[in-house]
Amino acid sequence: MSPPKELVRLDGRETCPDWNDAQLKENKDRFDDTTDTIALQCVLDLLRNVKECNRDENAAGAKICFLLADRTKADQVRRERFAAEGLNWAECALAQGGEERGDAYYYLAVNLGITVGKHPVSAVKSLDRTVASLEKAVALSPDIHNAGPYGVLGMVYLKAPPWPRGIGDGDKAMELLEEAVRRSTAYPMNHVFYARALWEVEGEDAEREITANLEEALRLRNEERWRTVRERWMDDVTDVARQAHIELTVR
């Protein structure tokens, strides 16, 4: 795959740490949802300027682009450009012999999902590839990004049209999302995704469990480590609560 024609212009580079390539390699795997946006842009800028990226650095680029795209929902063009770049990084990692890297498959899938998310025809065409990549991620690296392969695959089955129009399967979605909560119960969004599935599959019969998961998500998001993303996550919590007609008591 050729690189995106237009890369996102990065902000705040004048505040970036003065790292060399060796320091970049040492720190690149530490970035996650808790990392400040400017720091993510700094490391992406460094990766863009490494002369010869290996598969580890390509996989890191895919991850960082996804994290940036995921927190850029207000600007769809910028969001899709980050994801397109992330998709390119992931494909490069796999092309360099990274077939055993579940993270490359996972970040390929989530970046691909963002690039086609607002384009229904492209989304349908890419669905098989997305599912296959997530299944490989589940098999190879099930616990990366807070059990992300389980959570994202579960949401794919939850959102897709059911048979015969599509692969949608509420029971399979519930099983995968419950496993994501079990594997990474301290991650707030796993509880939100599971609560959404409970509402869409079981409805009012699951009100007590839906409420418990949403209130747990709210409690967890107040931890200091989630300060960079807690407000964005609040939108997801309140959306599920509104749909399920639930009044939350934990803030």
Image (tube, helix red, strand yellow):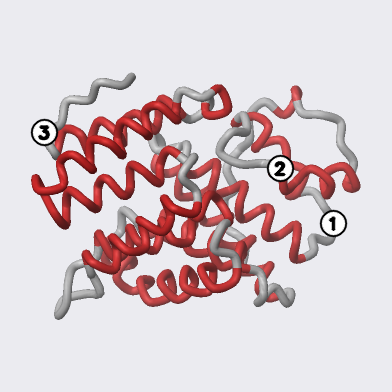
Q: Element at badge 3?
A: loop
Identify the mark nearer the N-term, 3 or 1. 1
- Of the residues shown, which amino acid type is indicated by label 1? Lys
Instruction: Judge by depth and name the residue closer to the eye, 23 or 226.
Output: 226
Q: Position of residue 107 (x, y in %)?
A: 55, 59
Q: Give the mark toward the camera: 1 or 2.
A: 2
Instruction: Judge by depth and name the residue closer to the eye, 90 or 234.
Output: 234
Q: On the rendered image, what quadrant is the C terminus found in?
A: top left
Identify the mark nearer the N-term, 1 or 2. 2
Residue 115 appears in view: no
Give the distance between the C-alpha atoms of the residues marked 3 and 1, in whole angstroms: 54 Å
**Marker count (numbered):** 3
Q: Element at badge 2?
A: helix
Q: Residues within 10 Å of mark 1 (few under 14, many from 20)?
A: few
Q: Residues within 10 Å of mark 2 (few under 14, many from 20)?
A: few
Instruction: Pick out the residue farthest to the bottom.
Output: 164
Q: Residues within 10 Å of mark 3 (few under 14, many from 20)?
A: few
Disc number placed over residue 30 in the picture, else none: 2
Residue drawn at point x = 48 percent, y = 30 percent: 229
- Of the residues shown, which amino acid type is indicated by label 3? His
Q: Is residue 202 above or below residue 12?
A: below
Residue placed under numbered mark 1 in the picture: 51
Residue drawn at point x = 40 percent, y = 30 percent: 232
- Dividing the picture into quadrants, the one containing residue 151 is bottom left
Disc number placed over residue 245 in the picture, else none: 3
Q: Position of residue 19 (x, y in %)?
A: 86, 36
Residue drawn at point x = 41 percent, y = 59 percent: 179
Q: Is residue 209 above or below residue 134?
A: above
